[in-house]
């Protein structure tokens, strides 16, 4: 990547603010909140402050509904696992490396141990040259 992309931090391109769902709340509430906010993922916190994970609309469908579980009786915290995040001062290259390594499309952004936003592959893609964008897409969607 060129120097301009390397100098840009995650904080420069993220969506500021992130509404969390608490770990004790149900997946049906998580789905309702996603619909209200127009998002496909929510950070999960255990007390409104400490990040425990992230839940996606796909997690609700595959990890709950398709598994025969009831989203009204399954807690968001039940699906929280393997938290991956990025610091606000990380470069785009560092965020891309995390996304590629974990084959994920969204990352919570933390500053002073607090969530301050979310960054998605779309946010990063807007700041990538075409060759790096193609590389990102192929790595994230490559079979594991």
Image (spheres, rainbow, N blue to C red):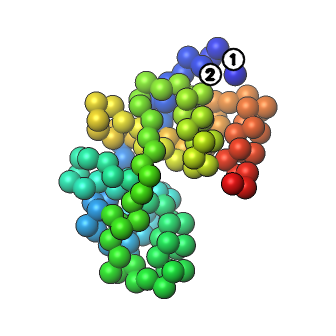
Q: Is residue 35 above or below residue 124?
A: below
Dot 2 surroundings within 10 Å: few (below 14), some, or many (20 or more)? some
Specify the quadrant that holds the C terminus.
Answer: bottom right
Please name the residue that numbered disc 1 is placed on. 2
Picture residue at 45% right of the left edge, 35% below the top: 86
| C-alpha distance separating marks 1 and 2 | 6 Å
Q: Residue at x 73, y 55 (%)?
A: 143
Q: Position of residue 12 (x, y in %)?
A: 48, 27
State the residue at coordinates (54%, 44%): 120
Percent position (x, y) of residue 139?
71, 44
Give the secondary structure at mark 1.
loop
Q: Which residue is mark 2?
A: 5
- Position of residue 58 measured from the top left corner of the image (x, y, whole percent): 54, 66
Q: Is residue 20 left or right of residue 68?
A: left
Q: Quadrant of the N terminus?
A: top right
Residue at the far left: name it: 47
């Amino acid at each position: 990547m060129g120097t301009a992309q390397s100098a840009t931090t995650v904080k420069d391109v993220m969506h500021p603010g992130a509404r969390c769902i608490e770990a004790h709340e149900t997946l049906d509430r998580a789905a309702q909140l996603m619909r209200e906010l127009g998002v496909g993922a929510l950070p999960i916190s255990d007390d409104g402050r400490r990040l425990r994970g992230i839940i996606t609309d796909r997690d609700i469908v595959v990890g709950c509904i398709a598994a025969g579980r009831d989203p009204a009786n399954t807690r968001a915290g039940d699906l929280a696992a393997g938290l991956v995040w990025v610091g606000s001062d990380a470069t785009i290259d560092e965020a891309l490396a995390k996304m590629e390594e974990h084959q994920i499309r969204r990352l919570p952004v933390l500053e002073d141990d607090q969530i301050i936003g979310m960054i998605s592959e779309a946010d990063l893609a807007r700041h990538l040259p075409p060759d790096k964008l193609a590389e990102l897409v192929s790595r994230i969607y490559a079979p594991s």
